[in-house]
Image (cartoon, coloured by chain):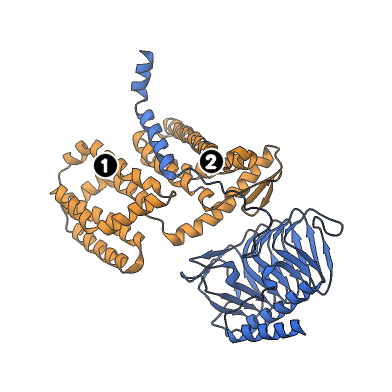
Amino acid sequence: MKALTALALLVCYRPTLQGMVKQWWTDEDMSHGFAVPFVILWIVWRERGRWQAIEAQPTAWGFALLVAAAGLQTAGGLGVGLFAGSVAFLFSVAGAILCLGGFVWLRALALPLLLGLFMLPKLAIVYNQATLPLQLFASRLAAAILTSGGIGVIREGNILDVRGHRVEVAEACSGIRYLLSLGFFAVVFGYLSDAKAWMRLVLLAAAVPLAIVGNALRVAAAAWRPSLDSGTAHTISGWFIFLLCLPALLGVRQLLNNIHTRYGA
Amino acid sequence: MRSVTKLLLWSALTVSLKAQITLGPTLNTFEVLAASTVTNSGPTVINGNLGTSPGGAITGFTGFGAGGPGIVNGTIHAADGVALQAQNELTAAFNAAAGAASTGIKNGDIGGQTIPPGVYTASSSLGITGTVTLDAQGNPNAQFIFQIGTALTTATSSIVFLINGAQASNVFWQVGSSATLGTSSAFAGNILAQASISLGTSALIQGRALARTGAVTLLSNLGTAPGVTGGLPPPPATPAPSSLILISTALACAGIYQSRERLLKMFRG
């Protein structure tokens, strides 16, 4: 029954899923979408003992959710866009879970569903509103990092000039990739490290400033060293600085653990 | 005589296009144009021509007069025929923008608003605090014309944000008196000011600063006239690695973290 439901969802949402995959393939901001379903499936498989042990309590609310999702999917097909269709897909999955196992199953599978949000395509209006302020903020922060390191820099909007070497903080440099990737990691890491619910939320919140500062460091490095502003060296430096954000998140986790041990026990 | 004929033809064309404002071919090459003076302090970069007419005082730019820290990636026209022609075309564009039929009223501060294409009238001054979004709704030819009775003032770090195909070249701010852009603001569009224009420190303008009767004052700014390529090559962008690479790295680290006990045992033999 479960396999049949999953198959039915895949068939019904085939155009939407194809659109999502196309965006993951063509847009490097969203390419992490390929990894998300695998992580979701792994968590569902890892937790199979727990949710299979829960007695199913199917509820008709699931059908209501499925109908609402179908309406949203139809609207998406009529031109509202891929985002609406993708949200409808997640609603349908939630509806199917309610139909099969009820609210107890939905609660048990809440984390994989939450991770599904990271698969959603860009919502243009939000993305467009976020990128320019992020670009300008990354530029300002990178300029401040360079200045505090004793390196003279001229910032012209989103362009940094270090002794005549200019780099542009374009949309793809805004930090959105760091933000999405580190946010996703924070959720998975919170789950793996058996953190309390409040710790998971703090970890997710901590990922935001860490990603922004990490990205500014990356931009500052590219402005400082011309050899790091393009090509393989640029990709490697970007990757390495992201790598440094991960132990920083581990440090936050450790700090939260200490706080919990000291005050929460 | 020829330039008068060109001007008349250009005025007729701009009026006949009603709300569709187009800058004249000479004015189109200018990033900054003033009537009296252009004064710069700090490392300003202007991508496009810069000029004054009828006044000829331009200060603060490398290779012109006493020199200065500013760079013009274009030509400086101080009270010459080209600047005069640009001023004439500015008058035509200013009048066309002022005469366009209004489709809406915008008074006070428009920060935080998302505005569709149209002709908007402010009876007195207009301000921008935060972000104002100009949404072309998928039409790259859509125009936004703001008829401002008196002053245009943008706050520190304010942003004019163009979305869904909106082009800076299609945004016109027809200002009845003077325009002042705030420190570190990011502005878009062509300012057609009756009097003067002042850009705050590090203000960025993707568009033009064109003053009919007064001065233009610059302070460590970056200005780029749409469609005009400056002498400098565009700086390289610094994109982050793709999110798939980042997330794969993060997941690999999560896997190592998860198996740390087993790995430690392996290392200890």
Chain B: what color? blue
Please give the name of the residue rendered at 17% of the width and 42% of the height, measured from the top-left corner. A54
Q: Residue at x 50, y 43 (%)?
A: A211
Q: Nearer the viewer, mark 2 or mark 1?
A: 2
Query: Which chain is in orange here?
Result: A
Judging by the rendered image, the residue that carries numbered circle 2 is A231
Viewer-proximal residue among B130 and B8: B8
Q: Which mark is residue A41?
A: 1
What is the residue that sits farthest to the top in this orientation?
B269
Q: Hey, which residue is sitting farthest left in the picture?
A: A1
| Chain letter belonging to callout 1 | A
Mark 1 crowdedness (10 Å alpha carbons): few <14, some 14-19, many ≥20: few
**What is the x, y in percent for residue B36?**
82, 71
Task: Estimate how packed mark 2 is, as few (under 14), some (14 to 19) or many (20 or more) residues with alpha carbons within 10 Å.
Answer: few
Mark 2 vs mark 1: which is more N-terminal?
1
Q: Amino acid at mark 2?
A: Gly
Count of labels in the image: 2
Which is more toward the observer, A217 or A193?
A: A217
| B122 up-or-down from A88: above or below | below
The spot of residue A112 in percent (x, y) is 30, 45
Can you give x and y, in whole percent of width and height, for residue A90 in the image?
29, 54
Q: Which residue is drawn at the image coordinates 69% and 63% (left, top)?
A: B48
Q: Could you tell whether B47 is left or right of B51 in the image? A: left
| Above or below B242: residue A75 | below
For the question of whether residue A57 can be seen, the reply is no
Amino acid type at circle 1 is Leu
When the figure is inspected, residue B141 is found, relative to residue A28, above or below; the finding is below
For the N terminus of chain B, the image quarter is bottom right
Q: Chain of mark 2?
A: A
Q: CA distance from mark 2 to mark 1?
A: 35 Å
A66 left or right of B172 in image: left
The part of the image, by quadrant, that contains residue A197 is top left
